[in-house]
Image (cartoon, rainbow, N blue to C red):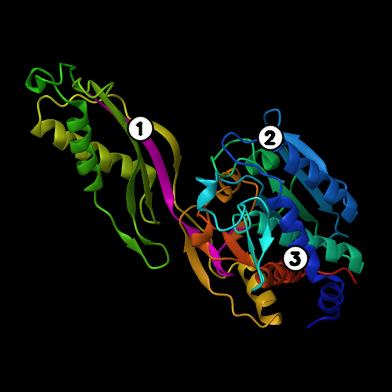
Amino acid sequence: MTEAIRTVLAALQDTWAVTYTAELVRRPSVNPPGDYTAVSAWVVQAFAEMGLEPRTLEGEPGRTNVVARIPGAGGGPSLCLASHTDVVNVGEAGKWRHDPFAAHIDGDGVMWGRGSADSKGMLAGMMAATRALLESKVRLRGDLYLVAYVDDETAGHHGLRHVFNEGLVKAEGLILGEATNFEIQYVFKARIWFELEAIGRSAHGAFPDRGINAIDKAYKTIQAIRGIPLTSHPKLGRDTVSVGKIQGGEQVNVVAGRCRASFDIRWGPGRTSRDIRAAVQAALERVRAEDPEMVLGDLIVTEERDPLEFAPDNPLVRATQAAGKVLGREIGLGGWYSSGELYPVYTGGHIANGLVIGPGEPWQAHAYDEHIPVRDLQEAARLYAVTALNVCGVHP
């Protein structure tokens, strides 16, 4: 362990990450609709109290990203630590063991609440790490950026990609905070989200043979699309086809004239979105050939991205694994179901390498009774701090 690492870890107080997580969880920021007023105002204040000079950027009114930078002395790579401030809804609040926005800590040292693991706890760890670097007076060579961004849960265009596109962050490396149980995610599934409408002919429900039931036709298309060729990846597992939403019919005694289904297909490296589109079209053509009454609307794509893979031994990965070793933790490599904001930031030419890592169990995201151990929040702060030292370098 170097003297710089010892100095920074000595400055880092375990209470910081826990307190910051609680403050973030207690400020609901459910998206949609995406009301960030309270959480963004607190982040701005917290950044300023740490000694940073926060900047804000809105893609739309009220959707506020908060950015800060520790300027480096020069001569080292720059790094961005980023995590999102939005959370998904809580569902039925009565099904939660504790108030989802109370940040309750139980007797076992576990914090409960929406956002504790996805991903306000990661942001809190990054904040605590940045504060330790500032208070330690250790000077970095490269710049270190800290970003609290919006609209991750809806794959919106006004979050981290907007911050990079507008030039508020200029960094070679990007670490996103998500609950990965301290495993580096370096390879990511592609995804395509699309809607497809089956068009039938309405009739009285008492005489279904006089109509063409669009729900029946939609069912056939769902089965066909689920049957497209799927493959497997050693880190990502099987490709998947999911039907996330169906809207069809007008009332119970009317044969459905229209039915719309929404699909989420995810797959690993080796195929592009063009390949998946072709597989879907081939499946639909087979359905049309088998059913002369099959009438389909246009396939409407709402989200599309190819697989993303960084070299497993790139400098950012090595620096993070080295930080783990210093802290007595072996950090493995894995793959993630979504590249999140890494994809638009990388394909936009802004970064050379990126990864996702954070405390907490991945399946806590979006779940009832979301929770995270306090000790994991504290360990994450130490990991982010040492990683920043390793990446940016220390000025003599």
* Residue 159 pos. (x, y %): 64, 40
Task: Examine the rendering and report whether any part of residue 359 can be seen.
Answer: no
Q: Which mark is residue 306?
A: none
SS of the residue under disc 1: strand
Q: Which mark is residue 195?
A: 1
Quick check: 283 above or below 241?
above
* Residue 219 pos. (x, y %): 21, 37
Nearer-the-camera pick, 107 or 170: 107
Nearer-the-camera pick, 108 or 258: 108
CA neighbours of label 3 inside 10 A, class few (<14), some (14 to 19), many (20+): many
Q: Amino acid at mark 2?
A: Arg
- Magenta span: 177-199
Q: Amino acid at mark 3?
A: Ala
Is 182 colored magenta in this rendering?
Answer: yes
Judge depth for marks 3 and 2 and give the one in front.
2
According to the image, label 3 marks what residue?
A: 388
SS of the residue under disc 2: loop
Horizontal relation, residue 130 to residue 89: left or right: right
First in residue order: circle 3 vs circle 2: 2
Q: CA distance from mark 3 to mark 2?
A: 28 Å
Quadrant showing the N terminus: bottom right
Q: Amino acid at mark 1?
A: Glu
Nearer-the-camera pick, 69 or 378: 378
x 45%, y 56%: residue: 337
Quick check: 378 above or below 175?
below
According to the image, label 2 marks what residue?
A: 63
